[in-house]
Image (spheres, rainbow, N blue to C red):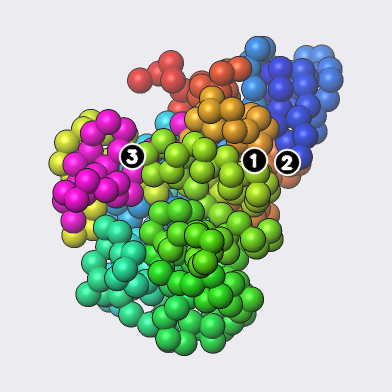
Amino acid sequence: MNYYLKADKFFYSYHTQGPGYLEIIDGKFGAWMEEAPTDVEIKDYSGKWIAPGLVDTHIHGFGGADSQDADVEGIMHTMSEGLLSAGVTSFLPSPLTDSHEGLLKCCEVIGNHYEETTGAKVRGIFFEGPFFTEEHKGAQNPKYMRDAEMWEIEDWQKAAKGLLKKVGLAPERVGSEEFIRKATMAGVKIALGHSNATYKQAVSGIEAGATIWIHTFNGMSGLNHNEPGMVGAILNTPNTYAELICDGHHVRPEAIEIVVKMKGADHVVLVTDSMRAAGLPDGPYMLGEYEVEVRDGAAWLPTGRPAASVLKLKTAVKNLVDWGIASPEEAIMMASLTPAKSVGIDDVCGQIKSGYEADFIVLDSELNLEATYLNGEKSYSVHIK
């Protein structure tokens, strides 16, 4: 199906266009123009904005499904379809710390069935663990935490058919630097977090090849004047990517603003870290092997600390703008192009670009989601329940 999109603003990678028209050809983006040709089909979104589909590179579950379940129906249909209501068109299912065999099963299921998605597209896998430390374990089981070994990565990657894009690690664990060097040479992005590392240990991990920080501020050593810790390393390594959970519970807006100012929109990655309860009512749920209580827009451990989240990525974008921290252009970049670049999938998603699959979202001027399109076809609309 070929047509032209008419809208007030189009969010390209580093600039906006509009008002005008964007050509959609055989499910892919074409050229933008100020005037459309005559005698063509036009989808009229006058007064609306067109942005690239959002990319969530750290998400455990949605709508009752969880990547840890290693269930085809749950990941490829329930989770994938549900994410369209969050404005997400590409995602990385993200299992938690587990045994080698448990994570291997996740790889096998995703690797064998990732092309069967009926909603948002699986673009890879993120393992949030198991190479972490107990001091900042969060809602993860420490009995599975261990030093990183390349043979595990090789096993998992083979089962995943090359889809393992990103692996979490605490840089103070034994042998981490050598592992980081080998893993990055093998094409896996290393993300540092759930760690009590010193500033020096964290920077050494970056020098070895790590490029991403897992949910900045959460699950890591903090900054003070004698020991800058992980947070200090994040703020002082400008070419690394900092994840942020912008739900108003995990990190205060003032702290988020500091990171955005220091890193810039091209190195801040908005993530949800959402669990199976995202998109569902409040109540008790399971996060991995732990029971959590969902209330007041967050998931809580019995200790009173937040665990994962129930955040939607479209809400994170709107929050940043509503809090006065970012412009719409910056916030959208942090939820589309920047996450895609952080894991090396910007060649297939995260931007409106001629020849790319036409995965995009329609927003009003207040950044409320109106519709989500996949391959140029409307797959979700707020007006259709």
> What residue does disc 1 label?
333
Check the image and name the residue furthest to the front. 226
* Quadrant of image for the N terminus: top right
Please identify the quarter of the rendering in which residue 333 is found: top right
Q: Are marks 2 and 1 in contact (CB under 8 Å)?
A: yes
Magenta highlight range:
290-315
* Local crowd size for mark 3, using a 10 Å CA cut-off: few (<14), some (14–19), many (≥20): many
Q: Is residue 381 magenta?
A: no
Q: Is residue 21 above or below residue 76?
A: above
At label 1, the amino acid type is Met
Spot occupied by residue 130 in the image (x, y as percentages of width and height): 35, 72
Query: Element type at marker 3?
Result: loop
Give the residue displayed 51% in from the left and 43% down from the top.
255
Give the residue displayed 54% in from the left and 83% down from the top.
177
Query: Element type at marker 1?
Result: helix
Per the rendering, the mark at residue 310 is 3
> What residue does disc 2 label?
13
